């Protein structure tokens, strides 16, 4: 009995070890670097795609900065599943609560130049997110911060910015912060400064067992956002927040 438990525990440890080494074994394909270089004035990006991504523990949760609107621009999809992969945001406390920003059928240049707008609004203490100011179809989230997801319909998988939610335990999203390069999002020679509140999110869409590790399957620039502390940290703050909301409710009741 004990032996069996020990054996399965050992197998589990070996399994995790294999998974971890599997995701690290393949070096990052050069396609992403080339794609950034070719879109950069002068032909060389200041970003080194193999070393300059945010650490995986800091790219899970995001918030919209001052403007209350975040534009997302689809840069490219070099992927067999490009017709069906979709991308959006999820509620940090319920990953099944989502708002899709790009449907699978969307591609560069198809949807108003490939750009969508994510709006956030707080109405009586509830946070709503809307796509392209379509507030009739807004989705309520448990907080004003969110994660990003890539849904891969072809493999019935969803990958999350929070790696611990991924069923294969692998990191499927690399995030790169703007470095003031002159950058052409549509690779059309029109350059604009890639600011530090603009991030490129680069996804790999296949299970770690199959993944080619190119991180070019869905590549999007998100603007007016910043990464925020992990949900675990936020839960601690949550207790204080609940207290504050209670206080505000009381105040509201007094007024009414
Ligand atoms: Ca990551
Ligand atoms: Ca697509
Ligand atoms: Ca890939
Ligand atoms: Ca690819």
Image (tube, grey):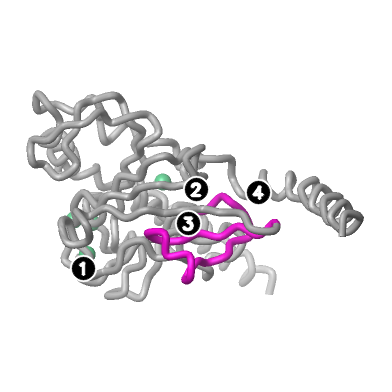
Residue 105 visible in image: yes
Give the SS element for disc 1: loop
Mark 2 or mark 4, which is nearer the start of the sequence?
2
Dot 4 alpha-carbon crowd within 10 angstroms: few under 14, some 14 to 19, many 20 or more? few
Which is nearer the eye, 198 or 12?
198
Residue 138: x and y, percent?
Answer: 50, 66
Disc 2 residue: CB within 8 Å of ligand 1:
yes
Cβ of mark 3 under 8 A from ligand 1: no
For disc 1, the marked residue is: 81
Q: Secondary structure at mark 2?
A: loop
Region in magenta:
125-146
Q: Height in image: 214 above or below 102?
A: above
* Depicted 191 relative to depicted 186: above or below: above
The residue located at (53%, 65%) in the rendering is 95
Task: Find numbered disc 3 in the image and state the secondary structure of the residue it sits on.
Answer: helix
**How would you rate the neighbour count of disc 2 (Cα within 10 Å): few for under 14, some for 14-19, many for 20 or more?**
many
From the image, tell me which residue sits under label 4. Answer: 232
Task: Kindly report the distance in space between the C-alpha atoms of the residues bearing marks 1 and 4.
Answer: 33 Å
Residue 127: in magenta span: yes
Q: What mark, if any, has residue 60 been given in the picture?
A: 2
Question: Residue 39 lies in magenta, yes or no?
Answer: no
- Residue underneath mark 3: 16
Going from the N terminus, do you reach mark 1 or mark 4 first? Answer: 1
Q: Secondary structure at mark 4?
A: helix
Which residue is located at x 25 percent, y 47 percent? 26
Please state if 250 lies on the left or on the right of 235 as rendered. Answer: right
Determine crowd level at label 1: few under 14, some 14-19, many 20+ residues with C-alpha closer than 10 A.
Answer: some
Q: How many marks?
A: 4
Can you tell which of label 3 and label 1 is closer to the viewer? Answer: 1
Q: Position of residue 114 (x, y in %)?
A: 22, 55
């Amino acid at each position: 009995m004990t032996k069996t438990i020990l054996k399965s525990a050992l197998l589990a440890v070996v399994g995790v070890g294999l998974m971890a080494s599997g995701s690290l074994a393949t070096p990052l394909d050069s396609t992403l670097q080339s794609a950034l270089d070719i879109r950069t004035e002068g032909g060389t990006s200041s970003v080194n795609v193999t070393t300059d991504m945010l650490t995986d523990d800091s790219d899970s949760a995001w918030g919209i900065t001052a403007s209350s609107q975040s534009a997302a621009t689809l840069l490219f999809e070099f992927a067999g599943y490009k017709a069906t992969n979709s991308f959006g945001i999820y509620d940090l406390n319920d990953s099944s609560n989502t708002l899709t920003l790009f449907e699978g059928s969307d591609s560069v240049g198809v949807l108003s130049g490939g750009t969508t707008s994510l709006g956030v609004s707080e109405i009586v203490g509830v946070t709503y997110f809307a796509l392209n100011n379509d507030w009739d179809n807004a989705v309520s989230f448990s907080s004003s911060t969110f994660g990003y997801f890539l849904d891969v319909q072809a493999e019935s998988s969803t990958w999350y910015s929070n790696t611990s939610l991924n069923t294969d335990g692998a990191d499927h999203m690399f995030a790169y912060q703007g470095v003031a390069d002159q950058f052409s999002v549509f690779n059309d020679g029109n350059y604009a400064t890639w600011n530090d509140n603009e991030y490129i999110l680069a996804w790999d869409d296949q299970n770690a067992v199959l993944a080619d590790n190119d991180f070019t399957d869905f590549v999007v620039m998100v603007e007016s956002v910043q990464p925020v502390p992990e949900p675990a940290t936020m839960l601690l703050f949550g207790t204080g927040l609940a207290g504050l909301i209670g206080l505000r409710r009381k105040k509201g009741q007094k007024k009414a």
